[in-house]
Amino acid sequence: MIGLIGAMAVEVEALMAKLTERREERIGMDTFVSGRLFGQEAVLAVCGPGKVNAALCAQSMILHYHPAWVLNLGVAGAGAEGVGIGDMVIATAAVQHDMDTSPIGDPVGMVSKINLVEIPCDAALRERLRQAAEGVGVRVHEGIIATGDQFINRGDVRQRIHERFGAKAVEMEGGAVAQACYMHGVPCGVLRSISDGANGQSDMDYPTFTALAASHSQQVVERLLTAL
């Protein structure tokens, strides 16, 4: 079984609609929908925005469904110049840009307990995602995806995150899902389609392009699972 997590319904609803042998289970405040998706046993969930929501959902999924790997998919803001609306970003690693215990000597972004700034994503899954994304016909980037409990809509904030972490995309869940997977020894991937520039235009671009960006992510997942 594989696990798919999106923050919002728009990010996974088209995939949920294609499930056969569909089952639903409520765990806490999360609903998990499982069945067969493009020939694979799969479980999907909408975690809600933010790191705590994402981590709790990922942990429940891991403990109850024991997926072979977990993919966090959805939309994000561009983290760097040259990453445009409609592009795909596949994480080599995820960081939590708002984690900061530097006053006591830690590097900015270091996550206590696992003692990592960059939480690695699975290399084999990343390669399969890259091949699937290229087949969709969109421009593909690989690199750091930065997570924090903020919707980034200022260019100076985006630039600061990029300069510190080299982020290609900024969003609110991937680093938390990656941490939960890392702590349980489950391979993880983070896939993002760019919906806005994470700048002063984001409040206009995000509602305009979210559905298109989410559609790109879902097309990649279809190609990924069909090829397994």
Image: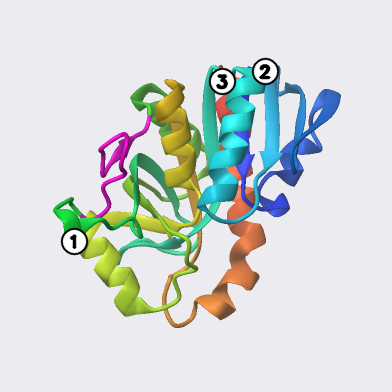
In the picture, the quarter occupied by the N terminus is top right
Q: Is residue 38 above or below residue 89?
A: above
Q: CA distance from mark 2 to mark 3?
A: 10 Å
What main secondary structure does the magenta stretch of the protein show? Answer: loop
Residue 146, relative to residue 205: is it above or below? above
Dot 2 or dot 3: first in sequence order is 2
Screen quadrant of the C terminus:
top right
Q: Position of residue 89 (x, y in %)?
A: 41, 48
How many residues crowd mark 3 within 10 Å: few (<14), some (14–19), many (20+)?
Answer: few
- Res 103 label: 1
Q: Which of disc 1 and disc 3 is earlier in sequence?
A: 1
Q: Amino acid at mark 1?
A: Pro
Q: Which residues are magenta?
A: 108-121
Expressed as whole percent of the image width and height from the top left, the position of residue 2 reads 60, 22
Tell me whether circle 2 and circle 3 mark residues in contact (CB < 8 Å).
no
Q: Are marks 3 and 1 in contact (CB under 8 Å)?
A: no
> Magenta includes 105?
no
Name the residue located 25 percent from the left edge and 37 percent from the top edge. 115
Task: Identify the element where label 1 is drawn.
Answer: helix
Element marked by disc 3:
helix
What is the crowding at mark 2: few (fewer than 14 residues within 10 Å), some, or many (at least 20)?
some
Q: How is the image coloured?
A: rainbow
Q: What secondary structure is marked by label 2?
A: strand
Residue in the picture at 41% in, 59% down: 170
Residue 201 has which mark? Answer: none
Residue 116 is inside the magenta segment? yes
Mark 3 → mark 1, Cα distance in angstroms: 47 Å
**Can residue 17 be seen?**
yes
Residue corresponding to mark 2: 40
3 vs 1, front mark: 1
**Depth check: 178 or 89 in front?**
178
